[in-house]
Image (cartoon, coloured by chain):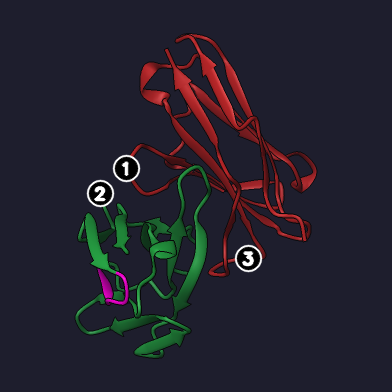
Chain colours: A green, B red
Amino acid sequence: QQQVKQSPQSLIVQKGGISIINCAYENTAFDYFPWYQQFPGKGPALLIAIRPDVSEKKEGRFTISFNKSAKQFSLHIMDSQPGDSATYFCAASDSGYALNFGKGTSLLVTP
Amino acid sequence: EAGVVQSPRYKIIEKKQPVAFWCNPISGHNTLYWYRQNLGQGPELLIRYENEEAVDDSQLPKDRFSAERLKGVDSTLKIQPAELGDSAVYLCASSRGENTEAFFGQGTRLTVV
C-alpha cells in the first residue's frame, strides 16, 4: 500500500521555468516530510525537508509548500536548470518509523 | 565526513545462488536502514536497526532474506536463495536517530539471471 502518492510521474520544463511536484498522504501521524534528489547510479540525497508546524520552507531555489488540512505537500524548483534534471522523491515518516517514499518524478530541464 | 559506504557496487548472480551486501554507515549514526529500490520506483524499507537491534523488519522476506548488524556498526544483508524478482538496487542508509536526515549509500545493483 502506497502511503505517499506522488505526481506527476515525469515532467519536462524549460530552463528558467518552475518545476512543481506534488505529494499526498493519508497517515495523519506523519510529522516529517523530506524531498530527496537522485541522479542515475547514485543514492538519494536530501534536498529539503519540512515539519508540519510550518506551511512553507525555502532553501535557495527550492521551496516546500505544506497543506496540513489537505494532507498535501509540494516541491517547487524556481529558475530550473539543466543540472536539476534528476528523479525527485517525496517521503514521509512519523516518530519511530522509517521513511515512506513516493514513486518518484523524473524531471528533465531542457536548455 | 565519509558517507555511507556500500559494497559491492554491482553483482550478477544466477538464480538460487546466495548473495551478500555490506554497509558501513556514517560514524556515530545509530540508525541503519536497508531499502530496496526497484526500477522506476521509490525505495522501500526492508529493515531498520537501532544500534544492533532490528526494530522494524516487517517488510523483510524472512524466508530468504536475513540481515545482521554486529556491534551496532557495519551491517550485512543476505539473500539465499536469490530469485529473479530480487533484481533491484539495494540501498543502505544511516541517520542519527528518528526523523532526522537519512544519508544513503550509492547502493548495490543486483541482477539475478
Numbered label attached to residue B97: 3
Tell me the amino acid under the disc marked 3. Answer: Gly
Residue A82 versus residue B16 in the image, above or below: below
Residue A57 on image: x %, y %: 42, 87
Q: Are marks 2 and 1 on the same chain?
A: no
Q: CA distance from mark 1 to mark 3?
A: 28 Å
Q: Are marks 2 and 3 on the same chain?
A: no
Q: Secondary structure at mark 1?
A: loop
Q: Residue at x 48, y 57 (%)?
A: A98
Tell me the amino acid under the disc marked 2. Answer: Gln
Q: In the rendered view, does B37 fall on the left or right side of B12?
A: left
Q: Is residue A23 visible?
A: no
Magenta residue check for B71: no
**Is the C-beta separation of discs 2 and 1 under 8 Å?**
no
Magenta residue check for A20: yes
* Viewer-nearest of discs 2 and 1: 1
Task: Give the total of numbered labels.
Answer: 3
Q: Residues within 10 Å of mark 1 (few under 14, many from 20)?
A: few
User: Mark 1 = which residue?
Assistant: B40
User: Mark 2 = which residue?
Assistant: A1
Subunit that carries the residue with mark 3: B
Q: Are marks 1 and 3 on the same chain?
A: yes
Which of disc 3 and disc 1 is earlier in sequence? Answer: 1
In this rendered view, identify the residue nearer to me: B36 or A76: A76
